[in-house]
Image: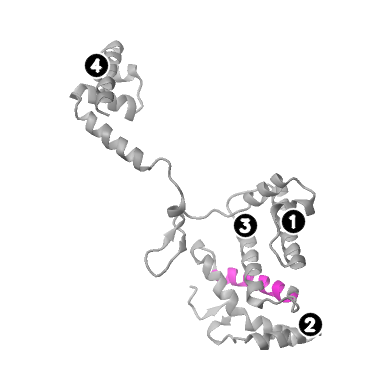
Amino acid sequence: MINKVEICGVNTSKLPVLKNEEMRELFKSMQSGNKTSRERIIQGNLRLVLSVIQRFSNRGECVDDLFQVGCIGLIKAIDNFDLSQNVRFSTYAVPMIIGEIRRYLRDNNAVRVSRSLRDIAYKALQVREKLVLDKSAEPTVMDIARELDLPREEVVFALDAIQEPVSLFEPIYNDGGDPILVMDQISDDKNTDQLWLEEICIKEAMKKLNDREKNIVALRFFAGKTQMEVADEIGISQAQVSRLEKAALKQLRKYV
């Protein structure tokens, strides 16, 4: 759907593209009260919105909805852009468009977050945007907490609570070959080389046991059954199961 020509009634193939010098002139005109210049800036940056919403194309959201929300972020960026700062408009606008879309996705998220936490998180995001505008630098969590007069931990907890879930199969980098997924960047303490070698050793050691010992070890330590349950299943006493189990484990330790 991202590649379709018309989104929200806008023919994307006919969207204008503004040069940086032209943009600065239009901003000066807009800030002098010219509403036509504002409309031209909006129209000239709709392609920027389209490029941003492609990042969210794998979430199953309606592209038209994301486009409209992205346009709200674009308009906020246009109305708050400071020409005196030596920064390109696109550099300033993209984070604001992304932020607006993320807020929309959080509000429509199936994971429910308490109203009080959500309020703290949104206030923290508003303070962050204000501090970015005032200082032209990314504020720390401590800066935001100080502005809100809240403990740092409470702000961190609130911001974490509204983070949208990310698929383990979401690509985070692609250089033209196989993409690197989120799951590729997560460590797995249960799948180390050491454990892999131990598993091979145990399998080899199990071959040294007789059939009854293999069965008891499998039922006890792989199926998770009690000695009484194993005794009932194979038709011997619990004391015999205990004795055979100890002998089997002794054998295993010898070979592992």
Q: Secondary structure at mark 4?
A: loop
Gap between marks 1 and 3 measured at Cα: 14 Å
Give amino acid for label 3.
Answer: Arg
Q: Main SS of the magenta segment?
A: helix
Tell me which label, 1 or 4, sits earlier in the chain: 1
Residue under pointer 2: 31
Tell me which label, 4 or 3, sits earlier in the chain: 3
Assess disc 4: are there few (<14), some (14-19) or many (≥20) residues with their C-alpha within 10 Å of its C-alpha. few
Residue under pointer 1: 123
Residue contact at pointers 1 and 2, CB within 8 angstroms: no
Q: Quadrant of the C terminus?
A: top left
Give amino acid for label 4.
Answer: Gly
Residue under pointer 3: 106
Tell me which label, 1 or 2, sits earlier in the chain: 2
Residue 92 placement (x, y as % from top left): 66, 72
Tell me which label, 2 or 3, sits earlier in the chain: 2
* Callout in the foreground (1, 4): 1
